[in-house]
Amino acid sequence: MLDYDGDTHIYIQIADILRERVAGLSSGQPVPSEADIQQEFGVARTTARRAIHVLREEGLVYTVQGEGAFVGPASEAPRKKRKTPLYQVIATEIIDQIKGGQIPPRRPIPGEMALVTQHGVARETVRRAMALLREQGWIYTVAQRGSYVSPKESWPQE
């Protein structure tokens, strides 16, 4: 339980909780994502990020950009770098849904938070995927409404 009125910063309290949790995990196992920490503790992304940073500075976890944080020191990182960045994987999945007719033209694609939850990634990863889709002509964005599949004639020629 977090003590919001105490003299210890919330991110340090969260880091203490996470430290206990990772003690029982083997090297290379994933640590809760920033989004998971935000949801579980009801804190801002910055607070979640600071908690992970504390553990990283202590050498208890390491991070792989676009994939998350994992138990163990970076020098012993058993995880290999992903060949295709996660934002491209997400964009390709959405393109396949568009081509397959699951998301027809002028209909909304899933929102940022839905994609964050579905893929277990940071919001910025989803935003990069959306930017790539917009750049290629697969989707367009309407302010305050969301992103929609472009008309078929706007799709890139393959």
Image (tube, rainbow, N blue to C red):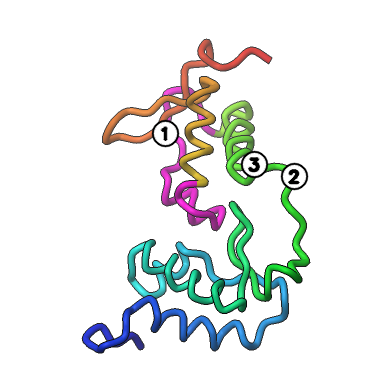
Q: Earlier in the sequence, mark 2 or mark 3?
A: 2
Check disc 1 and give the amino acid type.
Answer: Pro
The residue to which callout 1 is attached is 108
In the rendered image, which quarter is residue 144 located in? Answer: top left
Check disc 3 and give the amino acid type.
Answer: Val
Check disc 2 and give the amino acid type.
Answer: Lys
Residue at left 75%, top 44%? 83
Measured from the top left, where is residue 77 in percent x and y?
74, 67
Which residues fall within the magenta stretch?
A: 103-124
Measured from the top left, where is residue 89 in percent x and y?
64, 41
Q: Residues within 10 Å of mark 1 (few under 14, many from 20)?
A: some
Q: Earlier in the sequence, mark 3 or mark 1?
A: 3
Q: Nearer the viewer, mark 1 or mark 2?
A: 2
The residue to which callout 2 is attached is 83
Residue 7 lies within the magenta run? no
Whole-Å distance between the Cαs marked 3 and 1? Answer: 19 Å
